[in-house]
Image (cartoon, rainbow, N blue to C red):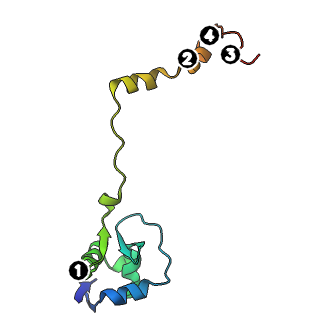
Amino acid sequence: MRCVIARFPFDLFKSEVAEAMKGIKPEPVTGDAVVISRRVYPVKQVGEVITRQDRRDFSSAEVVRALSKLGFTCRTAESAAPAPAPARTPLETASALLGSPDEARNEVPGAVSAPGAGGV
C-alpha cells in the first residue's frame, strides 16, 4: 500500500512491517502505540524503523494512519491512559479525613491507652 510519511511516499506491506520489527525490543510506551506480533511498540519507534528517518521528521499521526490502513491495531495516548479512580462516597471521604481509631488515640495529648494494647 502506498502511503506518505514526512512528505515521502512509501510502499508498505503488513508482512514487511512485521518482518522489519522482528527482533527489535519495544521501547517503553509513553504515547501512541501499535501492536505488532503481540508486542506493543511506540508508533515513533516503528516509524523510524520502516522509514529510516529521524523521529522528529514525522508525526505519530502519520504513522498511525498508515499502520491502521495496513490492518495493525493502534492505540492513541488517550485510550492508553488509565481510567480515573471512582469518586469517594461522603462516608469514605469523612473516614479518610478523620483517620483510623488507632491514629486518633496516638495523636490526642494525654490519652491513656488500654492496658495491654501498647504491648508494655
Can the viewer see residue 96 in this picture? Answer: yes
Q: Nearer the viewer, mark 1 or mark 3?
A: 3
In the rendered image, which residue does mark 3 sit on? 117
Q: Residues within 10 Å of mark 3 (few under 14, many from 20)?
A: few
Going from N to C along the chain, the mark reached first, 1 or 3, is: 1
Residue indicated by mark 2? 104
Residue 111, picture quadrant: top right
Is residue 115 toward the left or the right of residue 14 in the image? right
Query: Disc 4 residue type?
Result: Pro
Q: x%, y% of residue 36?
A: 38, 77
Q: Residue at x 30, y 64 (%)?
A: 76
Mark number, residue 109 = 4
Amino acid type indicated by mark 1: Lys
Q: Of the residues shown, which amino acid type is indicated by label 2?
A: Ala
Q: Tell me the quadrant of the picture where the N terminus can be found.
A: bottom left
* Residue at 66% in and 10% down: 114
Q: Are marks 1 and 3 in contact (CB under 8 Å)?
A: no
The spot of residue 70 in percent (x, y) is 26, 82
